[in-house]
Amino acid sequence: MTLDSQETPAAIVDVRKMEKNIAAMQERMNALGVKFRPHVKTSKCVEVAQAQIAAGARGITVSTLKEAESFFAAGIVDILYAVSIVPSKLPRVMALRKRGCDLKIVVDNASAALAIVEFCKTAGESLEVWIEVDTDGHRSGLKPEEDALLEIGRILHAGAIKVGGVLTHAGSSYELNTPAALAALAEQERAGCVRAAQRLRAAGIPCESVSVGSTPTALAARSLEGVTEVRAGVYAFFDLVMHNVGVCAIDDIALSVLTTVIGHQEDKSWVIVDAGWMAMSRDRGTSKQSRDFGYGLPCTLDGTPLDGYLMIGANQEHGILAPADAGHAPDHGDLKARFPIGSRLRILPNHACATGAQFPEYHALQATGELAVWSRLHGW
Amino acid sequence: MTLDSQETPAAIVDVRKMEKNIAAMQERMNALGVKFRPHVKTSKCVEVAQAQIAAGARGITVSTLKEAESFFAAGIVDILYAVSIVPSKLPRVMALRKRGCDLKIVVDNASAALAIVEFCKTAGESLEVWIEVDTDGHRSGLKPEEDALLEIGRILHAGAIKVGGVLTHAGSSYELNTPAALAALAEQERAGCVRAAQRLRAAGIPCESVSVGSTPTALAARSLEGVTEVRAGVYAFFDLVMHNVGVCAIDDIALSVLTTVIGHQEDKSWVIVDAGWMAMSRDRGTSKQSRDFGYGLPCTLDGTPLDGYLMIGANQEHGILAPADAGHAPDHGDLKARFPIGSRLRILPNHACATGAQFPEYHALQATGELAVWSRLHGW
């Protein structure tokens, strides 16, 4: 299969761009002297994780236990499950550990910590737990100065549970768009997480790993003193949100949706394609950024952006492409002649994690022009 | 499995509510004297389609060829593929027809009509084609008075292709919210589609079926004179968007996402749950409606809405529930006591089609309280 023959819609991964993105991040991490643990929630794809590990990544981060199970089955052993655990998921965690998976779990509250201690006592087993730190107030975790941080550390430590480290994710970096603001947030993320580790250590609780990261802060950090590892996910593909944040060029975006023109509404300068929201996802992440890309940026089959066009609307299996500024339709002559029925385009996504999730597999575009099928996880 | 033991997140279908919704729509269609052809793109689930057919539906509508193939394999023969066909998909269509599937395809342009004629001539076979009519300007189709309508009818008819009917979908009904406006749009949808059929027939082109529909217009239509069948999809589950449109009560919504509390941020009155946008989808369909439900409406495990709470934010696997009005947090006492770690909630979705699509299967809640697994299609 090639881009000309593959059925549409399809999720195309440009392997050359992906490998360039992976290499660039790894080089940066090597230069900063930290271990890199990519978040595989973006791709949920073994081939992508293998490329990350081949480039130098050590271990992975996952967002679901299904990811942990699948990537362990593919031979990856060092796995951090970076969502606060609930007691009902502990048997599934323990089953993986017993099979040899070095799976680490995360808590940010005393209730879960107590449940872990109780569970391990009953099972006669142990677990490795990392404590989540909140360094930017955008989601979960404990503030570095909170009393509860030490309380939880003590509950685990006293319960013979290994406190393996602290982790934080400065997800509010997605809302920034200047190098200075990103660098400042990266420093805030670093300093907060290091401070939490220091407090635990000062209280006699071992805390080896200090794990930070998001794609924007990983690419903006100037110093990572005290940090042992960085996590990032979307950098492998990048997307239009990351372009607006300022951490990639349009040409770096490795994921696109291959689509076919199925109709026109000439009076409105609309081109209708067979990629609707089921293909692109409903993610409108660029809607509040400096440049709103609608549901995505249409490109020619070779990946060149169609200047002045956007995917302005989406039904389930219909996408509407149109001039971005309705009052200034590009002077491209007859719409039907430029975009004939059956012709093909590629659409760059707002958010690679969300668009990828719509597809059971990627079609990986090789240097030869051939498409390889790469399976992708779905569900929990 | 029950709601207490099922792993989370999970997509729960309340079978009693679903069957009530299905029965109510079918009764309405029976009373209006039209055939009903449900759109299975909402559920993509054989068990749901079988319930629709058991209630009296005749044939189904699909949005992808994968749906056509899967539902035909489950024994459903009369299938309308309601997205404009492109020539590259014709071999897959023909393969299904040769196996006995009464699959009908749709066109709205001369280019595709000519390609169908050419394809059938070469293959020595025929196809049944319906022509798409645009009655509200929201997407694809030909306007009832357009010259191209007859041109396409003549291309097909002269090429020995059966013109089986005309169809339209007044999807702009989702933007309305009064009974009068919905009834007016339903009449516009009916009149436009009937007019297109009359013009084809007057030109000597047979056009047996006149197919209209969307959930809001189907429920608002006062007369369907000249219409032979109605299509609707989301009515089987309903959702918060449909509630805002005014065609269902909150209590009618049959789809919800089962989730577990994994954390709190007490200073912000946040409850963190393990259903993020990967579970709910990124659909924010209520954001421009009369009542914005954020990413969904949290309910207790028995389905009672948690008055005053919304899912205000979503990361991939984290959902943030909070008082809808941050300045007026409900006086419920201690957040951690009311929503302890490990406790379970159900979240009603903005858009059932989009939320369902995030899950490989539904968990169908029976009258006994047991959950049955119903598989759901993914991909194309």
Image (spheres, coloured by chain):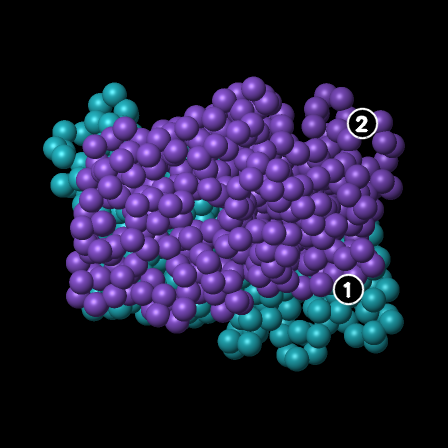
Chain colours: A purple, B cyan
Q: Residue at x 80, y 47 (%)?
A: A301
Tag 1's secondary structure?
Answer: loop
Q: Which residue is mark 2?
A: A330
Residue count near mark 1 (Cα–Cα under 10 Å), binned few <14, some 14–19, many ≥20:
few
Q: Residue at x 57, y 65 (%)?
A: B67
Q: Amino acid at mark 2?
A: Pro
List x then y, in percent, for residue A128: 32, 55
Q: Which residue is mark 1?
A: A1
**Measured along the vertical axis of the image, is residue B366 above or below residue A118?**
below
List x then y, in percent, for residue B173: 50, 39
Can residue A192 be seen at all in this image of the molecule? yes
Chain for disc number 2: A
**Measured along the vertical axis of the image, is residue B51 above or below residue B130?**
below
Q: Nearer the viewer, residue B217 or B124?
A: B124
Tag 2's secondary structure?
Answer: loop
Where, quadrant-wise, is the N terminus of chain A in this rendering?
A: bottom right
